[in-house]
Structure formats: C-alpha cells, structure tokens
Amino acid sequence: MAVPDVGTVESSAPPGFGYRWTICALIFFATTINYVDRGVIGLLAPTLQSELHWSEADYASTAQWFTFAYAIGFLGAGRFLDRVGVKKGYASAIVWWSLAAMSTALATTLPGFYAARAALGLGESGNFPSAIKATAEWFPKKERAFATGIFNAGTNVGAVITPIMVPYITLNWGWRWAFVVTGGLGFLWLIVWLIVYRTPEQHPKLSAAELAYIRSDPIERVTPVSYFRILGHRQTWAFILGKMITDPVWWFYLFWLPKFLDTRFGVKLGTVAAPIIVIYVVADFGSVGGGWMSSFFIKRGASVNRGRKLAMLMAALAIVPTMLAPSAPSLWSAVAVVSVAAAMHQWWSCNLFTLSSDLFPRRAVATVVGLGGFAGAMGGVGFQKLTGKILQADPTAYGRIFVFCGLAYVTALAIIHLLAPRMEPARLDGEAG
C-alpha cells in the first residue's frame, strides 16, 4: 500500500466514523474475553470451596497466584509489546491466556489450580499494554480517553457475560467445562485479529484523511527507552502509584464480590447472575462516560491536565459512599452502592490509563502501562492476602475492606496531582515531550 502524504491532507476535523473504530471494537472484544476468562473462578468460588473443601485462605491464595503472575507478566509484557509491535504481541498474549484458562479444567489439587491460574495471569498481562499501545497508534490524543473508555467497557461486558455463561455450563455439564468453553473464546478472536490488524500507515482500508487525523499530534521518535530512564520521571510514578492504590479495589470486586453477596445476602450460583449483571452493566456506563467526559472537557478548551483530573475527581468523590455497602439493609441497596462504585472505578480507570499516553510518547507507552500494571497487580496481591486473613478470622467482616475501597481513589488522585501538577509530558532523551 502506498502511504498517504499526511502533510497534504487536512487533519483538523475527524473524518466521521473511520476505520479506527473497527480497531477499537477488536480491542473491546479482546478485553471482554480477557475478563470472562479471569472472572470464572470468582463465580465458581463457593462451588469449588464446597467440592474441594477450600478455606477462605485457600481461595485467597488461588487469587493471589493469578494476580502475582499477572504483575510479573506486566513487567515483560510492556517491553515485549514495544519491541515486537501490537499485532504479534496481542496475538501471542491471547493464545497463551486462552490455553491457560482451558488448562484450569485439568486441575485436581490446590497446587494444580495455583499453576493454572499463574499461567493465566502471565498471559492476561498482555491485554492492557497491547490495548493502550494500539489506541495510541490509532487515535490522536483528543480521542484516546473516549476510545479507552469504549474498549475498557469490555471489562464490564465480560463480567456480565460470565455470570450468564458459567452457571448454565456448570449446572448442566460441571465446573470443568466452564473453564474449557470460556477459554476457547480467545481463538475465535485471534482469527479476526490476524486478518484485520495493521498499523495505520500499512492498512489498505484507511483513508488518507483519517491517517492524517490520527497522526495530527506532533511526530515522535521511535527508538526504545530504557526502564531506568522511564523510572526517573515523576510522571511515571504518578501513574504507578495511581494504579497501585486503586487497582486492588477492582481485583476485590472481581474475585470477592460473588462471595460477599453469598455471605451477606445468601446469593447462590443459580441466582447470582441478576445482581452481578446489574453491577457491571452500570459499570459500562461509567467506562464510556468517563472517557467521553474528559474528552468533552478537552475539546471544549480545557487543558489535558484540567480535563483528565476533573473527570477523575468526579469519580473519586462518587466512590466514597462504597463504605456503606456492608451495612446496606437489602441486597438491592447493596447492589446499588456497589454499582455506582464499579461505574466510577471504570470512569476513573479509562482516564488513568489515558494518562500514560498523555505523559509519554507512543514508543514508551506499553512499557509505562506495564510498570503501572505490575504495581496495580502487586497492590492487588497484598490486598487479597489481607482480605483472606480478615475473612478467615470472621467471614462476615467486610466493613474494613469496604472502607479502603471507598477512600482509595481520593488518596490516589491527591498523589497523582502532587507528582504531576501540570501534566507535562516526560522529556525522554532530551526531546521536547
């Protein structure tokens, strides 16, 4: 394909519904599958605990092995993506995690589950560095938060699909088939990805006008950047600490929310779908709304700094009432509180992810996301361990856990603002940002 001359095409206005949104849809579906595969065990936790005689600490350890491996995988995934590119990197990640998800069906002992979940965590760590890097390649800065919000909504769609699929499969064919069927979804996506994905400059279906619009930001260098150089910037630590403080809350929702509903309100596998679906459908609105809101502010003249942080502040304040969930008088009042918190987490998350591409050039984005993902997952490991200890001592003691969930975001935003008060892009190798 002959590459269009970007400099000769008007790029000030978006060329309508362009091909970039097809790429966004592909990332959305990959993220959906990612969350289906990781969420199966959370729904099956009461069943596995009953059949395999797991304690609260045993289940916590299973979640920790996944999260720890996910954290370690993030360190390598970002660098791998920056070196081999999105197409090969994303394909490799989904093959790995799909096979690992299916292998969980073979586990018969706790160490077997630990190994399968660790393998799944390593593979799934490739999703978000791939997704953020693809978004940075296919969208200008003014659209990235909105695009991130759309593909990040796949986390909630995955969490909605899982309680529909898993109980049906489990009640009809057994829990092992739940891992096999959900794990196989990734191979369907892989076929489409390998056929469709190219970089914008190489894609035959991309118009010259849309390529010009995508590349309307200043031209960036393409040489890789070392970890040490990236870690030397305050902007890196703003992203890392933001992830480390708030990601554990989402891990808690993913792995412990069905158990919380079971313990507090007696919601079993056959009836868990309705409250879980409500929570994550509401969360979808937060994901898309958060990305749209900050992009709206910026398109209306706000600086990137003001637009992103104002949107994040709105989420952080709305999450504080989450502390009331354990004392809610009824199931649906608790679901309402958690639904708002889940929506605002996604609102927050799509803007936090977008900070990586606001603050760093495309050549460093996946590495920065990998570092932040590592920190967030390690925070999740610690929080899961603490959750397991608290609930092992008292299975109903969710109050202290939800206090952290309510206060994490305002704390993280204060730290982000302290480290990046003006959201100035990091200068790498002497460049202007």
Image: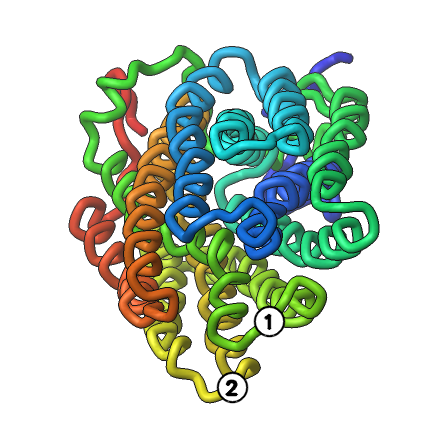
Height in image: 82 above or below 138? above
Residue 105 x/y as whole percent: 67, 33
- Where residue 295 appears, as percent x and y from the top left, is 50, 55
Which residue in the structure is indicated by mark 1?
267
177 left or right of 359 in image: right
Camera-near label (2 vs 1) is 1
Secondary structure at numbered mark 1: loop
Answer whether residue 265 is visible to the viewer in this image: yes
Residue type at numbered disc 2: Ser
**Which corner quadrant holds the C terminus?**
top left
Alpha-carbon span between mark 2 and mark 1 = 12 Å
> Residue 188 appears in which quarter of the rendering?
top right
Check disc 2 and report its element: helix, strand or loop.
Answer: loop
**Which picture quadrant has residue 206?**
top right
Q: Is residue 215 visible?
A: no
Q: Is residue 63 above or below residue 347?
A: above
Task: Give the position of the N terminus as an image quadrant.
Answer: top right
